[in-house]
Structure formats: structure tokens, C-alpha cells
Amino acid sequence: MSELTKNGACKVTAFVALLFLLAWVMAQLIWVLKLLVISLLIVYVLYPIVGFCKVKLRLGHTLAVILTFLLFLLLMTTLVSLVVPVVQNEIQEIIRDIPYYARQIQFYVEEFTEYLLAFGLEREHLEFIINFPSNIPRLVDEVALISISMVSSAVDIFFVLFIVFYLLFDFQSVRSAVIKLVPAVYQDHAEAIMSIVDRNFGGYIRGNIIRCTSVGVMTGSILMIFGVPYALLLGVLAGVLNIILYIGPYIAAIPALLLSFSPHTPSPIIIIAIYFFVQGIDAIVLSPLLLGRAVRLKPITVIVCLLIGQQLAGFLGIILSTPLAGIARSLLEYFRDERGQNEKSHKDRSQEPGVRM
């Protein structure tokens, strides 16, 4: 084997080893990385308030950061104290009433299977449909375990608040330091890329919070007006799952649809109409207004990104996948435009008198 071949093999081996080492380090630091990403999401939401306080209220940077952080803590404390006890009570009530709703659903399922028998449906399919209500308590237990694990993450919440405060204080400094790491020749491009990230990422996160909150409030209010039980819980669920574009609203409608089989609730048709009405407002008004500039992706692209994000990082990956895809699209457009401008500039120079190619 020649010396050149040996050097090439050594470089490939070193590169592969470096990739494995990087993957191992990332796996060991996954908890820290998740905390940093969550903190960064919150900072992107809050930093415009810091700018407002500095420009409109003429506060110094330190006072603006402290005021913004205190407002954030006040809002979170208010929401937790007002919403969490009610949602907790509704979860306890729905767990207590599970046997009743399971019997009601079982009754409708048995009637439905009688119609299906006429179509020659296979036995295993019928057994799955008939036994579906018996799986509901197990699903509720799993949801309860998830809720308990989320509530028990007090240490994570403390670290997130700590990181958020210092990121708010040093956000511009960190941003400038990242740009200065790039060679001076490419710093203009780095500034433009950073602006693209800020616009897509920050715009998507802020717009989605307003959008999902609006959908949750509308859903819960309308369900409450029509006398649907657990309206607040269903509204919170609709708002949270609406983060998942195109898919979340259908998942959020399933619990309300199951509850509608009770004789004390509106018919399933009314429930379906309510969710279609709210999602119509979301699709026609909220999404174009709040996400139009941040997300210009085809639905199939968004769905594929959601699936990939879920596989890579769970629910956090679902939240991040769409803005990251939007950033990738904007970066491709930026480099395409830069290439076009460079080609045009080169062509103009070649056509100037006295310039030979």
C-alpha cells in the first residue's frame, strides 16, 4: 500500500472516530442540550419585550431584563395557580367517570358492530373494535404517569429559569460573539444568516404561542357554552396539540368526540362542527397572520419534518422541526440569490469597455 493511500485511510478513520466521539458526547449531554434549547425558545419569546422596555420605556438594559423576567415569572405563576388546579380536578373527575364513559362507548360500539357484520368484516377487526373501550383506562393511566413526571421536573424548571435570565441579559453579546468566530471575510454572510435564523425561529415561536393560545381559548369557551364537560381540559389539550401543524387538531378532537357519546353531552356532530369551526379560523386567519412569514412550507414537507423531529427528539423535536425547515428553506433562497447577484455582477464587469475575458 502506498504512502498516499495510507494517509487517506488514516484521515478517514480519524474522521469516523471523531464522528463517533461527537455522537457519544452529544448523547451524554442530551439533558443539558434540552435545557438550553427550551431556554432559548423562551428567550426568543421574551427578548422583544426587553427591546420594547429599552426603546419605549427608556430603561437601561439591566432594568429592562429584570422587568421582563419578573413579568414572565408573574405570568407563569398566575397561569399555574389559576389553570393547573382546575385541570387537575377535571383529570381526577374524568378518571373517576371512566367506567361510565367506557360503558357508553361499549354500547355504541356493539351497535356499530352489528351494522359491520352485514359487510363481512373479518373477526380480528371486529374484536379490536369491540375491545377498544377496555383499553381506555390503560391509556388514561399512561397519561397520568406522563403528567406526574412533568410535574416532578422542578429541578429542570429551576435550571431553565436560571439560564433564561442570563441569556436574556447577554443575548446580544452571545450573538455578536458567535458572529466574531467567523472569519472577517464571511462576517457579512454570518450576520445575514443570523438574521434569517432570528426571523424564522423567533417569528415562528412567538406566532405559534399566540396562535395556540387563541385556539385553546376559543375551543374551551365554545365547548363550555355548549355544556361539554371538562371544557377547560379539552381547551388546554387543543391549544397544546395545535403546535403540531395539520395533525394536532385531529388528535385533540378525539377525547371530545369520545365524551360526546354520553347522553348528557351534545351530539358528536356538534362537537365535530365546533372543532371544524375553530380550525377554520386558525387556517384562514391565525396561521396566515401569525405564521405566514415564518413558515412557507408545503403541508407534506411539514408533516415529514414533524415525523423526523418526533423520532429524533420527541415532543421537543416536533416543536423545532418546522422552524428549522423554514430556516433551511430561507438559507437556500439566500445562497441562491447571492449566487445570482455574483453571476450578474461578474457578467456586468465582463461587458465593461476594456475588460477582456
Image (spheres, rainbow, N blue to C red):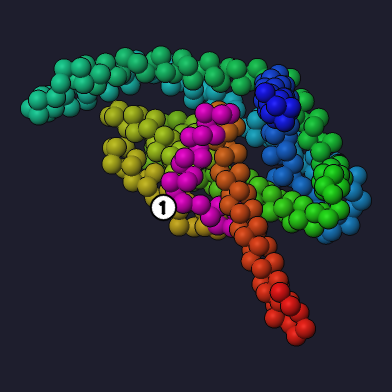
Q: Residue at x 66, y 68 (%)?
A: 343
Q: Nearer the viewer, residue 145 or 24?
A: 24
In the rendered structure, which segment of residues is drawn in magenta? 292-313
* Vertical order, 52 against 31 (above or below): below
What is the quadrant of the N terminus in the image? top right
Q: Nearer the viewer, residue 64 or 6?
A: 6
In reply to whether residue 304 is colored magenta, the answer given is yes
Most distant residue in the front direction: 2
Q: Nearer the viewer, residue 147 or 343?
A: 343
Q: Residue at x 76, y 79 (%)?
A: 355
Q: Position of residue 277 (x, y in %)?
A: 39, 50
Residue 2 in view here: yes
Q: Residue at x 73, y 34 (%)?
A: 39
Most distant residue in the bottom direction: 353
Residue 92 in view here: no
Read off the residue under disc 1: 280
